[in-house]
Structures are given as C-alpha cells and as structure tokens.
Amino acid sequence: MNETRRRGRPRSFDTDAILDAMAPVFLTHGLAEATLARLEAATGLRRQSLAYAFEDKTGAYLAALSRYADRRVTAVEAALAEDGLAGLADLWVADLARAEAPGCLLVAATSDPEALRVGAMDQVLARAQWRLLRRLAGAVAAGQGDGTVAPGRPVVMGRGLLALGDGLMAQAGRPGLARVAERVLRDHLTRVTLS
C-alpha cells in the first residue's frame, strides 16, 4: 500500500488493544497457523483493516511481539517491585495456569520455525531479554543485600533465572505444570543459589 492511501484513511480502532488481542493467537497457533480468519475473529477487524494497519501478517506479528515484549518487561518489573523474586514466581505460575494461551509469546517465538525466518524478530527478542536480565540481576542483588538470596554474581544468577523461566514457559499447557511450578518456584526463588 502506498503512503498516500495510508494518510487518507484514519484508523478507527485502538492499535494497542488490537495488538493485545492478536498476541494470544500468535502464542497459541504460531505465525504460520495464525490465519487471517483467526486474527479477524480475535480482533473484530476485517483482513483489509489488518492489512491497512500492519501491511501483512508478518508485520502484525512483529508489532504484536514488540507490544507484548514491552508489557512483559513491565509486568516483571511490577512483580519484582511488589514482592521480589516471590512476585516473579507468582507471575510465572499465573502465565502457566492461564486456561487460554498459557505461556509466553517471547519464548514461543524462539521455537516457531516460521517466526525464526523473520529477521527483525531477533532485535525484539534481544532487547526484551536484555531488559529482563537487567531487572533480574537487580532483584538478585537486592536479595543478596537483605540476605534472601545466596551470594554470587547477580548477572550470572539472573541468566539462570531467565533460563528457568524460559524452560517453564516452553512447557506451558502441560497438565499439572502450574501446580508443580508453584511448589518448586516458591521454595527455589526465595532461596536462589544459581551461580
């Protein structure tokens, strides 16, 4: 679509709300199986409107992933600020326990063959992982300061926590995983010894 046509047609919908509605579709079905029909059903928009707003499905995916990444980091920051690493455990368990679209779109993207062909996705994922690692390392350092986290290098321990969370999200949807994760995480994340 050319820019003249774009300027002549103002959007009549909340882009952020549309991106939030698309994210569970991409999480559940992956890029290849997130059909236009499924995106229409999730957003209430017709494919012409989706194409106008995002050019194509890949553009919609990247926009939804970027928005999801920003919201995800914000949610982790809030959880850590509210209750430290125990708050992070609560967030992960909630992600695993969701009835619809359990898990994390950032983690799902790393194992989605179709999405992995999208070059710009690497930048979105790298930026989100860097931001998450900074927050986790900060939480580990704070926990070391108050004695709730074992001594060690905060960045290395933060990487371990990030890997733990990614591993759990990669298994999202397995029966009983949320219950098991809740028990393990509540114990583990209150006495972090990863190094």
Image (spheres, helix red, strand yellow):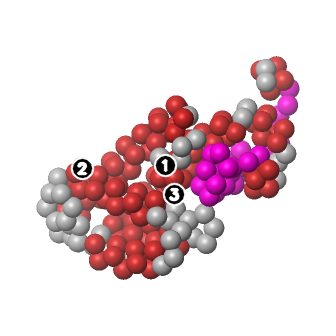
Label 1 sits on residue:
111
Name the amino acid type tagged 3.
Answer: Cys
Crowding at dot 1, Cα within 10 Å, few <14 / some 14-19 / many 20+, comes out as few
Label 3 sits on residue:
104
User: Residue drawn 63% across and 42% down?
Assistant: 61
Whole-percent x, y for residue 180 in the image: 40, 78
SS class, disc 1: loop
Q: Quadrant of the C terminus?
A: bottom left
Residue numbers of the magenta segment: 8-36
| Gap between marks 2 and 3 measured at Cα | 22 Å
Whole-percent x, y for residue 62 in the image: 60, 39
| Residue 192 falls left or right of residue 186 | left
| Gap between marks 2 and 1 measured at Cα | 25 Å
| Gap between marks 3 and 1 measured at Cα | 12 Å
Q: Nearer the viewer, mark 3 or mark 1?
A: 1
SS class, disc 2: helix
User: Residue drawn 41% across and 64% down?
Assistant: 168
Label 2 sits on residue:
155
Q: Nearer the viewer, mark 2 or mark 3?
A: 3
Name the amino acid type tagged 2.
Answer: Val
Snapshot quadrant of residue 48: top right
- Give the dominant element type of the magenta stretch: helix, strand or loop: helix
Whole-percent x, y for residue 9 in the image: 85, 31
Snapshot quadrant of residue 152: bottom left
Name the amino acid type tagged 1.
Answer: Ser
